[in-house]
Amino acid sequence: MRIAVDIGGTFTDLVAVDDDGRVHRSKTLTTPDDLARGIQDCLSAAKIDVSQATFFVHGSTITINAVLERKGARTGLITTKGFRDVYEIGRGNRPEGYNLFFKRPVPLVPRDLRLEVDERLYAAGEVLKPLDEQSASESIGALKAAGVESVAVCLLHSYANPVHEERLGQLVRQQFPEAYVSLSHEILREFREYERTSTTVLNSYVEPIVQRYLISLEKTLETSGFHGTFRVMQSNGGVMSADTAKKMPVTMMESGPVAGVIAAAHLGEKLDCRHIISFDMGGTTAKASLIKDFHPEVTSSYYVGGYITGHPMMLPVVDIVEVGNGGGSIAWIDAAGGLKVGPQSAGAVPGPACYGQDGTEPTVTDANLIVGRIDPGYFLGSGIRLQRDKAAQAITEKIGKPLRFSLEEAAVGILTIANFNMSLAVRAVSVEKGYDPRDCVLVPSGGGGALHALAIARELSVPRVIIPPMPAHFSALGMLLADLKHDYVQTFVRELAETSGAELADAFAGLEKTAIETLTEEGAGRRQILLRRFLDMRYRGQEYTLPVPITENLRAISDFNAIRSRFDQLHQEHYGHSAPNEPVMMVNLRLSALGRFENRLSLASSSRDSDSGERGKRPVIFDNSQQPVDCPIFLRSGFKAGAQLKGPAVIEELGATILLYPGDKMQVNDFGHLVIDVGS
């Protein structure tokens, strides 16, 4: 049996597949005080004996939550003399030019814990001034006396030559053995001092918490009799060993949401859909990502907490746009009397008012219950019985009475605003990047994705929505589809015309050696390893780069004309112009290393004759007219391949509700996916 567990802000999801292809799943409320208990709850709910499992993969929000809530370890930073304030100064750009109250991100390491050592390298890596070990010992002693738990080391130009950083790491481990240590050249070897420092600090800040959590989870699994392979999901769309995750926890920052994108990419490949928008709506947030030619878009410009006030992390992350609107997002009225939804969430505890757990704030889930879109008796397959009177009370008191709205009017207003907010995330990964949503297919996942997908598709004129199998557990399913993956980078600034293929091949060789060693340690055979090379390139005088795939045998090529043409074409696609006569520079070498495993997991849905046919009707409100429409209710498991249905209708399955609007047309394809053509 292979097991995947995804811990979200509100729910914990489990998917398990045995050797016969049978799928087991469960969904329970997340337990923020003890995340491992939530995993045990899921295993119990699915009636799974973990001792029979051979593979366990896990994604969690523990890393990003520690940063957003500023609950990480007390961290110190050691850097080159004269550069300790780089981390606080950051960049000179002002994201909100007209915000008079704009404030820069507050560093995770205060100034008194940012210390210096006397050393200096040239940008090319030559030693200008040797490391002064006396100053190093003084800084280490000061951090030890200050009670720090974790130490980040980021010296100037160590990406080019780590000799001083390696020695400083040895001194920290000798003189302060109980400290967790992160060396920047082991995290990434790319220039940009501020972003490199921030990434190293983030790793140090979360390392003690993540290590303790993973060790605790390993012990829990071992106590339960599990002796198989334990993997952890990471932000680049691959998985890694638990030992790697303990050393590089910063790569887990978006480990949960990314898995749903990987599953959507596999689904697109299966159905030959080249442009997919993955839309994942959970209890706390909604996430959108673009998948082009079966590959998710990946970025190295990621900010933990958002671009405006977040902390930069310069590691490859599947490009996800996130908005604070989910099923548990709270509706509220601002000082000017405007209705708002999110980003605050009721979370798992107390949860939406309708959960009956003493929650008093109106949420998106409460609004869906009032307008009849979800069944109070079949929420989570009857795992939670929703209380309509509690939802009505919360919406009436907090929204209806202050705005003089009826109950239904307030509920529809909450849903209209929530849908618009979530459509902004979909717009950000499509329209704002030059892709027409009319050329894309929307694949929703998460507990609320299928319920809101058709409204969002209408908002952006997306013509087709495909509901995958188990949408409420799709992220956990994606973890079982992910390969081992690691990304490596090395700054290599040269003019393209002034280098040779052999020089590039030699530079890539060091990255490839490290990648193969790491994947081999994690259990990949040589035939399973796939290495993909990229060059970060730009025109001379530009600041930022584009990654250009390299498929040629570098030692055999005599010129770079094909690579140059590929860069010009990519520049034309991204920015609408190119300059074929301008000199081109290389900035970074990138290597994406995959350890591929045979995957027998099917992305098909099954049906049962006993579940076919209409299960009744209930009134559902679709729009601002507040006029309820009697909608037939169906179970998804009752639809066979080829079945068709016209909206309006409600289709229910474990953990998710699919809402067909009037005019929508649904057909079940050969794999059991619900293919919905969106009505005008």
Image: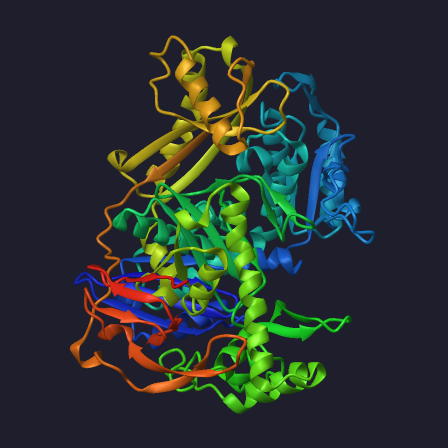
Please report the residue visible at 45 percent of the width from the left and 18 percent of the height from the top: 564
Q: Is residue 296 left or right of residue 605?
A: right
Camera-side residue of 151 and 40: 40
Say which residue appears at 51% left-offset and 45% top-offset.
248
358 in relation to 277, above or below: below
Q: Quadrant of the C terminus?
A: bottom left
> Is residue 316 visible from the viewing direction of this image?
no
Q: Residue furthest bottom?
A: 389
Q: How many marks?
A: 0
256 and 143: which one is in front? 256
Percent from the top left, x then y, of residue 119? 72, 25
Q: Position of residue 484 (x, y in %)?
A: 36, 44
Viewer-proximal residue, 202 or 183? 202
> Residue at 73% across / 45% down in the picture?
143
Q: Which colour scheme appears in the figure?
A: rainbow
Q: Is residue 410 visible?
A: yes
**Is 128 situated above or below 224?**
above
Q: Position of residue 258 (x, y in %)?
A: 44, 52
278 w.r.t. 341: above or below = above
What x and y, as percent, mark residue 519? 36, 38
The quadrant in which the N terminus is found is: bottom left
Q: Is residue 33 above or below residue 557?
A: below
